[in-house]
Amino acid sequence: MRRNIFEQVHDDFRKTARAFFERECAPHAEQWERDGKVSRQAWRAAGEHGLIGWALPEKYGGLGITDYRFNQIVSEEFFGSGAVGIGLGVANDILVPYLVDLTTDEQKDRWLPKFISGEFIGSIAMSEPAAGSDLAGIKTTARDEGDHWVVNGQKTFISNGLLSTLVLAAVKTDPAAGRKGISLLMIEDGMAGFSRGRKLDKIGQHSADTAELFFDNVRVPKENLVGELNRGFYHLVSHLATERLGIACYALPMARRALELTKTYASERTAFGQPIGKFQVNRHFIAEMQTKLDAAQTYLDQCVLAANDGELSDEDAAGLKWWTSEVQWEIVDRCLQLHGGYGYINEYEVARLWRDSRVQRLYGGTTEIMKDLMGRSMGY
């Protein structure tokens, strides 16, 4: 189906993104999957190609362009090229809005140039062993010691956890105040007492380094408070809509990649004297998947435009996130089925896509949490 939301500048950016992923990432997919992380050189190359932080001010190396269509294009070309691992979505979809909206001029001077160049890699640390969707339940504390904070606690499921130079961490600066006592601190690589645990052994997304982080009396300068003191919960909630939009922007390109691989396979693989795509049941499955993908794409494109206009509501983002991730899973699972036994063999890309897709229904808020948010917004 023809899409009409992009302009020439987006088409040019798309060519840059595709060339980068095909040259700098896709050839290393198997190695990065074995290593469990991508190379830092790939991050620096992404910075050189202008694929990090274009929404940040020009004086720091960005373009000052706030247009979520660019985020969407990066996700589409990343999966369309067969690339893996490099967590540009964490940087652009999740961290950049905080860096734009909440950092001081002094913080921007310290962090943004190297963030945009790819020298600094960022992560956001919210989840803890006993606090996932229940953000108010975090236990990590930051004790006020005059000119610095002393941070103690643990985070888990942190994307870019092993490679990150900057960790935007949610901490309790007033433990007795519940959600009204949460603040955001930027914890930097090399701070005494900050350590990284094991790389988590995930079902999928093996090349995306997901780790545990530990804070043992980490002294964090007061100058590293991001946003307002004790307003961290509200800062986080205010940015969840775009985070969930980013997850949806991952969902459909992953499903599209799986479907394209499956169409090719169904045309080439023969059984009983004909390509398997010629069998009516398989032809119907492919037709259903294409239609559902096109419908979901229209939904997503409209939400991207709404975000650009400042009109993407929390409930719309929640609905989009659960719907696209469920459609994604249905399509990828069906694509694996159409590959037969080969779909279960790891050397086939569809097997990796299947593994990598499962988490989409979990992070950023589970499908069940998203439905509950929508239901409550409707007065139920």
Image (tube, rainbow, N blue to C red):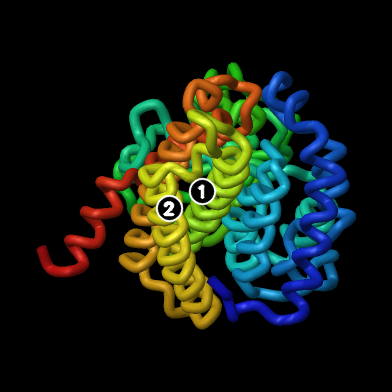
Asked if residue 7 lies left or right of residue 204, the reply is: right
Question: What is the number of callouts on the image?
Answer: 2
> Which mark lies nearer to you, 1 or 2?
2
Residue 90: percent from left, percent from top: 61, 48
- Is mark 1 in CB contact (under 8 Å) with mark 2? yes
Inter-mark Cα distance, 1 to 2: 9 Å
**The one of 342 and 275 positioned closer to us in this rendering:** 275
**The one of 320 and 354 positioned closer to us in this rendering:** 354
The circle on residue 255 is 1
**The one of 360 and 129 positioned closer to us in this rendering:** 360
Which image quadrant is residue 331 in?
top left
- Give the mark nearest the N terminus, 1 or 2: 1
For the point 55% across and 23% down, which residue is it? 342
Which image quadrant is residue 12 in?
bottom right
Q: Is residue 346 visible?
A: yes
- Whether 273 is drawn above or below 331: the answer is above
Asked if residue 263 lies left or right of residue 374, the reply is: right
Residue tagged by mark 2? 289
In the rendered image, which quarter contains the C terminus?
Answer: bottom left
Dot 2 falls on a residue whose secondary structure is helix
For the point 61% across and 26% down, which residue is it? 206
Dot 1 falls on a residue whose secondary structure is helix
For the point 66% across and 29% down, which residue is it? 207
The amino acid at mark 1 is Ala
- Whether 203 is drawn above or below 176: the answer is above
Residue 86: percent from left, percent from top: 70, 41
The amino acid at mark 2 is Met
